[in-house]
Structure formats: structure tokens, C-alpha cells
């Protein structure tokens, strides 16, 4: 063995040994999973090293919410840091994802932060106490920045990379650095010092490069926020590819928007940062808003004052645009056509965006210049001649090159000025052409461009990745999984990819990261709905499953989740104002940040079932006893005229328990007939009605108004629920339907609806008019519906709101129609039948109505409004036809009646066998 070869091997052995010594014995796994276990994300939860509280800390929150929990002192900085150090240690044993470990320094830093918060009461910055991991290329004082090269080991940094200082000033706890490929020039994170990093979703697939260690650590939640740099304006894909491979979120800012210098050290060639391909720092995280937090923190640090290539560009806190967004979808880059599952993800995303009212254009035939994308990147890579410097670093210790970089990293002379200018001109032409993509055919600007990250799912180890690129800031969003349905259409032996997330990228305009993030939020919502999805939505299981927790999960719809309607602080503050204005009784328990387990919610559900639902059942039982009394009273010769209305109004189906028990009671009560000269049915109403009244009065005292108002002398002085339980109940209710807190201590709309119903019905009786009053509902709706059909999509929201409000104020005539139907029925039997037919038509109308407004017609519902306009017009015509028909029939009877003498009329009234509507003296109401 040569001296050089022995040098690199000795360096690697020493580094690994030193690293292993930094993991405490009590944090070591008893055994590693078998190779047959692909998905290892559940092992940290199940291995017994983490306490339940540490599992809660590492699995429940994203970086934004965790910072808030620390600020509120729900958790101390130290216990948070300890939890993530332990989880990172577990991740290292499973995935080989770490390089430099400085757990002790991180824990000491956490103690200092706790002391500061205790003394001053305020955090030192927005990341106070949040553990943040770093890609290995970030220089931290006292630790190596080896970048996968043995020759750079045991040469600790003497100063921090600028981005590290920014993070420390913001209060972050730095505790480890993560693995990369040798020279950071490959898509598989493997090197001779640390070995290969494993993808936690599948040991057979790469976690990506050059930031595979970071993406693997974040995917297993050993970190919530990892900071990396992307080479080549991310043309190299150092953020996108790892995020794609592990189902995480990543955002690559415009080169120069944040910090661009990699930092002090021997890896780069001094002065080469402004030549050829530039770099850009960016995050990989468990949530999109964590990425946003990092970008804002760095932008607010004003690094343009100290960094060579950083552009003056302060962070802009833009308001969310409540409007249609316009997207362009690029299905291909003309280099490789995405495989069917990727194509399907793009199509589904486009369809979901359209269903939410956004404009989406799909460019089926992209311009030819896109296929030259990679050529421009290859032309400019190594423009400064840095390849020779890297080869020198590798050869100095006899270290072999890893397979993915052989032939890529080589000695080459730097370009002369003529060559450089020529290639920069070609690149600039490409960029100018790419800028034209941002204009739609109608001349309007697109808000974002959506395309695939790669033409395929995450690749196996030691393979390459094809990327789709544009010179712009962009982010990665995870979509649906590679599934069994499509696997036979795509690759051979593709069982390795089942359940692996697929990803797409959202491209924004240059230096407009704020707008990019807004577009990403819209796309994220389109893919996952209002609830959204983060890594926490995956069930962590050591059996290799990769199921997503949804409302239909095996635990049912129990437990809190990260991405709910109040996740956006702006939405939460809006509804908080609504609840305060409405004086909602539970407003003091409203907490957008509260989380709870499925077990807690199940226990509360059982408590509510026993205390509330049982009494509610008794209330309905007592009420139904009275309803059923009608039939029992009739059996005891109650005058039928007293029962006609109820028989026609109430369905014969009632609670079976009420039917059985009520009948047994009635059998005895009806035997009391004759006492005090009363009929049996009167006793039935008196006794069973008294039972109903008693239950009603008791319910007034025993049924609390809401979960936060259960304390009383007749319930429990300390209440049914603890403060936390009240918060869980109130927030679960509001997250399901925020409007539930906007209908208290004020006149409910249904009550106003009832008042309007009474007024309209009374007017109908006063003027003795039914058809025209009923028709007024349709006449009322007509102008509003017509306006909704004709107004443009860009009409101001308050105009649309006013039209909808006016539309919904239509006079409600249901009671008039029921009475009209009953009045024109010829007998009690006919009245029951006609009432049943009327009810059938009403129910059929409800079934039909739910299909008028469809998802693909959102948000303006032009088609639905046209259909409803046609229905209203038809109804108006029908009312007129019915009125004229009844007028005609009444005229014919009037003519016959007028021809009869007074004696004939009297004779007819007393002796005719004609019934009700057949009688000549009967006039149809209209």
C-alpha cells in the first residue's frame, strides 16, 4: 500500500472514530434494522431512546410553531435541543447522515438561551432555541469543513460562514453538520470519509445530492430546518433534488438574494465566486412556512452590507392576494418526457388549481430553446478552472474519486476572456428567451411556472438525475406517491419506488421570493386541500409503511394536525376578531397553536357521549312521545279534525324505543278514560306531555351552552372539563367549521328566517293570494342570478357579495305551499297522499340541487347560476299556469252555482254526496 493511500485511509478511520465517540452510549440503538426494512422513519419513535415528551417535541411541530412554543415557555430551549440531539444521533446510526457533531456545544448554547429568556422575558431572535442543522460546507469555528475530501479533515475553521453568524444572532441552536458527496458534485451523498447516506423512506434509493445528509435528517425529523447552499443557481439541483428524494420542502432563492459566499476554507478557489456558476443558500424543512421563516431571517440580516455578491433586497411582507392566480405548466423540458406518474401529478395539480378558480395554461409544446438548458450549465461549470484545484485536493492523500464524479471533476484550464464572454452571451440569450415564458397569450403575467423537478422518481444509489431548470427562484412541493396503479407503465423492477413521494417545482420571478412563496402556498393547498400536508402527516412506523394520516385514517378523524385553517397567522387573527365581535362564549379558549393526541380526543368523545348525547337522546325521546300521542289519541276517539294537521305533517317513522315504550305507557294511561269525565286521550296528553315538559325544563339547567360553560351548582362546581380539555373541544369545533363561533349571543339567521316565513305567510292570507306570492320567490331571485351570470370574473368582491346577499333574501314560501296543498286536497286521505307527494318532490329537489353547483365551476359558478336562472324562470311560468287553471275551474263552478236557485243550493249543500273539492260550492285557493 502506498504512503498516499495509507494517508487517506488513516484520516477516514480517525474521523469516523472521533465521530462515533461523540454519540453517548445511552443514545445508541441496540440493533440496526434488517435490510428488508425500507422505511426507517418510525424507528426513532419506537426504539425507546426518546421519551414521550421528546417524541412530542420532535414530531408535532415545524420550526415556526416550535419557536412559538419556546417563546411561551411550553418547552425550554435545553429540552428541545436535547430531544433533537438524541433524534439526530439515532438518525446517524440509521442513515449515516451526519459529519461534524457538536451536541455538547448545542446543549450549552440552549442553556444560555434559556437563561436569557428567563432574565429578559424576550427571545433574542425569531429562531430562539430552534435547533438548526447545517450542510457540511458551512464553516463553524472549531470544526472541519471537509466537503467530503480527506485532505480537508482535521483543519478546523477559524471563522464562521456569514450565514452561520446570522443563524446564531437569530437565536438558533446549531448542533450538527450533514453529509454530502465528495466535492459536492454528485446527486448521491457518498464520500470516502463518512460513507454513503441512506434515504429514510427507502434504503435502496438515494436521498439526493449534494445535500442528501440534510434532506435525510429533516425527513426523519432529526432536524426541522436544514441550511444548505445550491450551486449553479440551483442548476445543479442541490436543494431541489434532495427535497424531491425525501418528500421535504425546499426553496432555492435567486442567487445573490441572500448570502452567496460559501465561506472561508480551502475548498474553493479565491475570487472564483463571481465567475461562471454562482451559489445560493436556501432551506430544506418539514414545512413551507419554515422555509419562509429562514428566508426572512437572512434577508433581515442585511448581508449585502458585508457580503461580496449579495444584492440589496430587503424582505417584503406582502399581503396575501385574494384573487385568481395565473400559472403556466411545463409538462416537459424537451430533454426527457416525464414518466406517467409525474405527468399525472402535473395534470392533477393543474386541475385542482382550476377547480379553485385559478387560471392555468398548459404549454404542451414548449419552445425549442429549453432543450439547450443543460448545455449552458456544462459550458459554464469550471469556467474559473477550479477542477484542477479539486483534483489536487483529492490526489494529495491518495484518495480515489467516487463513481458519480469520475470524468466530471478533472483538470482543465480556465476559460480565456473571449471564451467566457461568448458563453455568457449564449447564457444571456437563453435567459432572455426564458423571460418571455412569463407572458401569457393574452399579455398577462404568470404568477408562477409549474414543472417537474425530474422526469422520474428518486433514483437508486450511484445514478444520475435529470432536472428541469429555469434561471429563477424556485421551490419544491411534494405531491402524490408512486403507486401500484401506474407502476407497470414506467420502469422495470420498480417495486423500490412504491409509496415514494413525487414532487414538482414552482418557479417564481427573479428576486421575488415573497411572491414565489405565496404561489407555493396556493399550489400546496391545491394538492392537499385546506388541511394541507407536512411530514407530520406521515404515520411513523418501523414496518416500512408510508401511509398518510387523513380524516379516514385507522384512528378516524381524531387528533390535531399541523396544517389546519388557522395555520396561517393572518387567517387566525381574522377569525379571532370575528369571535370577539360575536362575543362567542368560547373565544377565550381559541388557540390556533394548540395540539392534542388522538387518545385525548377519543377520551373526550366518550365523555361527551355519556354526558351530553345521552341526555340529548332523552330529550328527543320525550318530544317524540308527544308526537306519537296523536295516533294513540285518535285510537281513543280523539276528534279527527284536531289531528288532521299533524297527521299530514309528521312522518310515520319515529324512534323505535319511543314507539315501544310510549305504546306500553299509553295502554295503561288510556284505561283512565271516564275519570273526572275525561276521555283517555286527554290523560295521555296530560301525563306524557307533562313528562316532555319536565325533561324540557330539566334540559334548560342540565345542558351546558358550550364546552367552556359547564361550571354551575347543578352540574359540577369545577366543571366537566379541565382548561386543556375545553381548549381541545373548542378548537376542534372551530377548525372543522370556523363559522361555529360566529353565531352566538346574536339573533341566529334561522330565527330571522322563521320571522320572514311568518310575515310572508301572513301577507299571503291577508291578500288571499298564494300563487303570485309563491312566485315572488322566483321573481326576486331572477335579477340577482342574471347579474351573477353576466358579471366578469374580475368584478370586485363586494359587488359579488352584495348580489349573493340579495339573492339569499328571497321570500321563503314553503309554508304557503304546504297549506295551499292541504287546502286544495279533496279529503283527509287525499291530503295525506298529496302531502307525501309534496315531500317527495322537495326531497328530490334537494338531491338535484346539490349537483347544480360543481367543483369544476368554482369560484364564480357561472354554469350553476345559469341552471338556477332557468329553474327560477320555469317555476315562475308554472305558478302562472297553475293560477289560471284554478281560476278557470272556479269560473266553471261559479257558472253552475249561479244557475241554481236558493232552494236548490240548500238542497245540494245538505244532501249531495260530493266530497270536498268535488262540491260545486268549493273554490280552489290560488
Image (tube, rainbow, N blue to C red):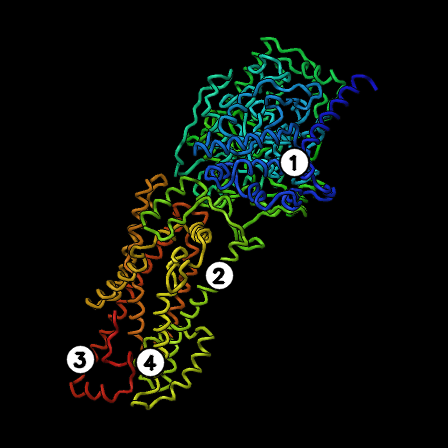
Of residues 855 and 293, the one drawn nearer to the viewer in this rendering? 293
- Measured Cα–Cα span from mark 4 to mark 1: 75 Å
Of residues 782 and 227, the one drawn nearer to the viewer in this rendering? 227
User: Which residue is the site of mark 2?
Assistant: 607
Of residues 579 and 551, the one drawn nearer to the viewer in this rendering? 579
The quadrant in which the C terminus is found is bottom left
Image location of residue 52, percent across then percent down: 59, 46
Instruction: Identify the image quadrant of residue 690.
Output: bottom left
Instruction: Identify the image quadrant of residue 713.
Output: bottom left
- Measured Cα–Cα span from mark 3 to mark 4: 49 Å
Left or right: 72 with respect to 426? left
- Measured Cα–Cα span from mark 3 to mark 2: 72 Å
Residue lying furthest top: 417
Nearer to us of marks 3 and 1 is: 1
Tell me whether circle 2 and circle 4 mark residues in contact (CB < 8 Å): no
Mark before the other along the chain sequence, 2 or 4: 2
User: Which residue is the site of mark 1?
Assistant: 89
User: Which residue is the site of mark 4?
Assistant: 686
Left or right: 882 with respect to 213? left
Judging from the image, what secondary structure is the residue with disc 3 in? helix
Mark before the other along the chain sequence, 3 or 1: 1
Mark before the other along the chain sequence, 3 or 2: 2
Image location of residue 736, percent across then percent down: 45, 51
Judging from the image, what secondary structure is the residue with disc 1 in? helix
Tell me whether circle 4 and circle 1 mark residues in contact (CB < 8 Å): no
Nearer to us of marks 2 and 4 is: 2
Nearer to us of marks 3 and 4 is: 4
- The disc at residue 898 is 3
Mark before the other along the chain sequence, 4 or 1: 1
Amino acid at each position: 500500500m502506498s504512503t498516499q493511500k495509507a494517508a487517506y485511509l488513516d484520516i477516514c478511520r480517525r474521523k469516523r472514530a472521533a465521530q462515533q465517540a461523540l454519540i453517548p452510549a445511552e443514545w445508541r440503538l441496540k440493533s440496526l434494522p434488517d435490510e428488508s426494512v425500507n422505511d426507517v422513519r418510525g424507528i426513532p419513535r419506537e426504539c425507546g431512546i426518546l421519551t414521550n415528551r421528546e417524541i412530542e417535541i420532535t414530531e408535532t411541530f415545524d420550526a415556526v410553531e416550535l419557536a412559538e412554543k419556546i417563546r411561551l415557555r411550553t418547552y425550554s430551549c435545553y429540552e428541545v435541543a436535547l430531544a433533537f440531539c438524541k433524534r439526530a444521533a439515532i438518525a446517524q446510526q440509521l442513515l449515516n447522515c451526519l459529519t461534524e457533531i457538536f451536541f455538547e456545544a448545542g446543549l450549552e448554547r440552549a442553556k444560555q438561551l434559556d437563561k436569557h429568556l428567563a432574565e429578559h422575558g424576550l427571545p433574542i431572535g425569531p429562531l430562539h432555541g430552534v435547533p438548526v442543522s447545517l450542510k457540511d460546507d458551512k464553516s463553524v469555528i472549531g470544526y472541519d469543513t471537509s466537503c467530503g475530501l480527506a485532505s480537508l479533515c482535521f483543519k478546523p475553521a477559524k471563522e464562521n460562514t456569514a450565514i452561520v453568524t446570522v443563524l446564531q444572532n437569530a437565536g438558533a441552536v446549531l448542533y450538527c453538520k450533514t453529509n454530502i458527496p465528495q466535492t459536492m458534485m454528485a446527486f448521491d451523498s457518498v464520500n470516502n470519509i463518512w460513507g454513503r447516506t441512506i434515504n429514510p423512506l427507502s434504503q435502496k434509493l438515494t436521498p439526493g445530492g449534494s445535500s442528501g445528509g440534510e434532506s435525510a435528517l429533516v425527513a426523519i425529523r432529526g432536524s426541522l430546518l436544514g441550511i444548505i447552499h445550491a450551486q449553479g443557481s440551483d442548476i445543479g439541483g442541490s436543494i431541489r433534488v434532495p427535497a424531491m428524494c425525501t418528500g421535504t420542502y425546499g426553496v432555492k432563492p435567486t442567487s445573490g438574494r441572500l448570502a452567496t459566499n460559501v465561506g472561508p476554507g480551502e475548498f474553493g478557489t479565491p475570487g472564483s465566486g463571481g465567475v461562471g456558476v454562482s451559489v445560493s443558500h436556501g432551506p430544506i424543512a418539514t414545512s413551507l412556512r419554515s422555509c419562509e421563516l429562514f428566508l426572512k431571517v437572512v434577508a433581515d440580516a442585511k448581508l449585502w452590507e458585508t457580503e461580496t455578491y449579495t444584492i440589496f433586497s430587503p424582505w417584503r411582507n406582502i399581503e396575501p392576494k385574494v384573487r385568481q392566480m395565473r400559472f403556466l405548466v411545463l409538462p416537459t423540458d424537451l430533454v426527457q418526457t416525464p414518466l406517467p406518474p409525474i405527468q399525472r401529478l402535473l395534470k392533477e395539480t393543474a386541475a385542482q388549481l382550476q377547480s379553485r378558480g385559478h387560471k392555468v395554461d398548459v404549454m404542451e409544446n414548449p419552445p425549442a430553446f429549453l432543450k439547450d438548458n443543460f448545455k449552458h450549465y456544462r459550458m459554464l461549470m469550471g469556467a474559473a478552472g477550479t477542477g484542477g484545484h479539486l483534483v489536487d485536493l483529492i490526489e494529495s492523500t491518495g484518495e480515489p474519486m467516487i463513481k458519480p464524479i469520475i470524468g466530471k471533476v478533472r483538470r482543465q484550464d480556465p476559460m480565456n476572456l473571449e471564451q467566457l464572454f461568448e458563453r455568457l452571451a449564449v447564457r444571456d440569450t437563453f435567459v432572455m428567451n426564458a423571460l418571455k415564458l412569463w407572458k401569457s397569450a393574452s399579455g398577462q403575467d404568470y404568477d408562477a411556472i409549474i414543472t417537474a423537478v425530474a422526469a422520474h422518481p428518486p433514483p437508486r444509489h450511484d445514478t444520475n438525475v435529470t432536472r428541469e431548470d429555469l434561471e429563477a427562484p424556485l421551490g419544491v412541493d411534494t405531491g402524490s406517491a408512486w403507486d401500484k396503479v401506474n407502476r407497470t407503465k414506467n420502469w422495470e423492477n420498480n417495486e423500490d419506488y412504491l409509496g415514494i413521494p413525487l414532487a414538482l417545482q414552482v418557479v417564481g420571478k427573479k428576486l421575488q421570493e415573497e411572491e414565489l412563496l405565496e404561489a407555493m402556498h396556493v399550489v400546496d393547498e391545491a394538492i392537499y386541500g385546506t388541511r394541507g400536508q407536512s411530514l407530520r402527516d406521515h404515520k411513523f412506523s418501523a414496518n416500512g409503511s408510508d401511509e398518510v394520516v387523513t380524516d379516514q385514517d385507522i384512528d378516524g378523524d381524531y387528533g390535531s394536525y399541523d396544517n389546519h385553517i388557522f395555520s396561517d397567522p393572518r387567517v387566525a387573527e381574522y377569525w379571532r376578531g370575528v369571535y370577539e365581535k360575536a362575543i362567542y362564549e368560547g373565544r377565550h379558549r381559541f388557540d390556533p397553536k394548540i395540539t392534542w393526541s388522538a387518545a385525548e380526543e377519543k377520551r373526550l368523545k366518550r365523555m361527551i357521549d355519556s354526558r351530553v348525547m345521552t341526555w340529548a337522546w332523552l330529550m328527543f325521546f320525550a318530544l317524540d312521545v308527544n308526537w306519537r300521542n296523536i295516533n294513540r289519541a285518535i285510537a281513543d276517539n280523539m276528534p279527527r279534525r284536531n289531528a288532521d294537521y299533524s297527521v299530514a305533517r309528521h312522518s310515520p317513522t319515529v324512534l323505535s324505543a319511543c314507539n315501544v315504550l310510549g305504546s306500553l305507557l299509553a295502554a295503561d294511561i288510556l284505561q283512565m278514560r271516564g275519570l273526572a269525565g275525561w276521555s283517555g286521550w286527554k290523560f295521555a296528553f296530560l301525563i306524557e306531555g307533562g313528562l316532555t315538559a319536565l325533561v324540557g325544563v330539566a334540559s334548560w339547567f342540565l345542558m351546558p351552552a358550550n364546552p367552556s360553560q359547564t361550571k354551575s351548582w347543578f352540574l359540577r362546581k369545577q366543571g366537566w372539563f379541565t382548561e386543556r380539555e375545553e381548549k381541545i373541544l373548542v378548537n376542534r369545533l372551530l377548525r372543522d367549521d370556523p363559522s361555529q363561533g360566529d353565531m352566538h349571543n346574536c339573533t341566529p339567521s334561522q330565527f330571522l328566517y322563521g320571522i320572514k316565513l311568518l310575515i310572508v305567510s301572513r301577507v299571503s292570507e291577508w291578500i288571499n293570494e298564494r300563487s303570485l306570492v309563491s312566485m315572488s320567490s322566483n321573481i326576486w331571485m331572477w335579477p340577482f342570478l342574471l347579474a351573477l351570470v353576466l358579471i366578469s370574473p374580475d368584478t370586485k368582491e363586494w359587488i359579488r357579495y352584495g348580489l349573493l346577499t340579495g339573492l339569499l333574501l328571497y321570500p321563503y314560501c314553503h309554508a304557503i305551499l304546504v297549506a295551499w296543498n292541504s287546502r286544495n286536497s279533496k279529503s283527509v286521505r287525499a291530503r295525506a297522499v298529496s302531502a307525501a307527494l309534496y315531500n317527495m318532490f322537495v326531497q328530490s329537489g334537494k338531491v338535484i340541487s346539490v349537483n347544480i353547483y360543481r367543483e369544476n365551476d368554482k369560484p364564480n359558478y357561472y354554469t350553476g347560476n345559469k341552471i338556477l336562472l332557468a329553474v327560477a324562470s320555469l317555476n315562475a311560468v308554472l305558478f302562472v299556469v297553475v293560477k289560471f287553471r284554478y281560476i278557470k275551474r272556479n269560473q266553471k263552478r261559479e257558472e253552475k252555482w249561479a244557475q241554481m236557485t236558493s232552494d236548490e243550493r240548500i238542497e245540494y249543500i245538505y244532501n249531495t254526496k260530493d266530497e270536498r273539492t268535488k262540491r260545486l260550492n268549493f273554490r280552489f285557493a290560488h
